[in-house]
Image (cartoon, rainbow, N blue to C red):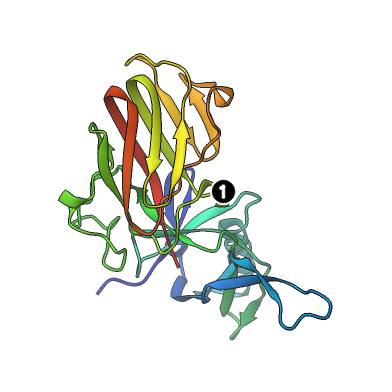
Amino acid sequence: MKDRTLKILKNGRETDQTELSGLHFLDCVISAPNLIAEYEVFQGVDGDQDNGARYGPRTVTANYYFETIDGFDYELACHEVWRAFFDKEPYYIIDSVNPGMKMLVRPKPFEFSRLNLMDMKFTIEFDLFKGFRESLLTSTNPKLFTEEAWQFGMNLLTADDLTYTHSTNRFLIYNPSDTVISPFQHHELDITLTCEGNPAITNKTTNDYFEYNQNLSKSDVLLLTKVSRFLNDKPCGRNTNHGVITLAKGWNEIEVSRCSNLTITFDFSFLYF
C-alpha cells in the first residue's frame, strides 16, 4: 500500500513535500460544508425573512511528522517547511486519498511542536476559501477511469454518456457537481460556439437564455466565459442580451437556435463538498 501524500500544485507543476528528507505526511481532514444563511429581520414580525444562503470558506487540516539528524538540522528543517508551504499566491493541494480532486488554499500560520532534540510534529490549517473542492481536470478531458484524475465519488457516469462538445441544436449536458455551476458565483464555465447565424442558447432546465444579436460566420468564435463575452478574442457584450447560462445539478437540456452548422463546447470544473 502506498504512503498517503499531500501534493502541492502550482503553475501546473506538482510537488510532493515529503520529498524533503525526514518529512512524513500523516493525514488530512477537511471541515464540513459551511452553509451561511442570510436572514432579514422586520420589526414586530415573527421570525426572520429568508434571503437565501451561500457556502462560506472551509478549513483543511494536514498533520506532519519530521525527523531530523541533530539540533542544527532541526533549525534548517523549520526553514525548509516554511519555504515549501508559504506563498503569497494561493495554490492547490491534492490528497492522495482523493486524487481526482484539488483544493485551492492559503496556509495559516502554524507552530512546530518539538518532541525531542531532533524530532517534531506540526499541523497546518489551510483556508479552502472558495468552499468547494474542484475536479483535477475539466469536463472536456477524456473520462478514463484508469487515470487517477477520475475517481469514484465524483458522481460520474460512463464515459460515453459524458459528452461536452455537440454539433446538434438540442442536446444534454451533465453536471456531476454537488452544486449548481453559476458564473454569478464566480464558478468557471466556458461555452465556446462556432456557427452560421445569430445564435441563441437556452437551458430549458434552468430557464436561462443568452442571445447574440449579430450574424456570425463559421470562422467566428463566440466565447462565454463566466459573465464576460468575446467574439474572436474581442469583447462583444454590447451585442448580446447579457444573459448568463448556469448548469443545474444533473442533466441539463440545452437548445441552440437561430443558427446552423454549429459546434458548441461546455468546459468547466466539477465542484464537490
Front one among 251 and 21: 251
Q: Is residue 141 left or right of residue 144?
A: right
Q: Secondary structure at mark 1?
A: helix
Judged left or right of residue 78, residue 152 is left
Q: Residue furthest front?
A: 45
Q: Quadrant of the N terminus?
A: bottom left
Q: Position of residue 143 (x, y in %)?
A: 23, 51
The relative height of residue 199 versus residue 42 in the rendered view (above or below) is above
Q: Is residue 80 left or right of residue 225?
A: right
Q: Position of residue 158 (x, y in %)?
A: 17, 56
Report which quarter residue 61 is drawn in.
bottom right
Residue appearing at x 40%, y 46% in the figure = 268
In the picture as drawn, the residue positioned furthest to the right comes out as 43
| Residue at point 45%, 53% (across, down) | 181
236 to 3, vertically: above or below: above
At which x and y percent is residue 62? 51, 73
Q: Which residue is mark 1?
A: 184
Side of 43 relative to 214 (left or right) = right
Rendering coords of residue 135 (x, y %): 38, 55
The quarter in which the C terminus is drawn is bottom left
Q: Tag count in the figure?
A: 1
The amino acid on which the numbered mark 1 sits, given as a three-letter code, is Phe
Residue 132 versus residue 202: which sits nearer the camera?
202
Q: Nearer the viewer, residue 82 or 162?
A: 162
- The answer to whether residue 145 is seen in the rendering is yes
Q: Is residue 68 visible?
A: no
271 or 80, nearer to the observer = 271
Residue 189 sits in which quadrant?
top left
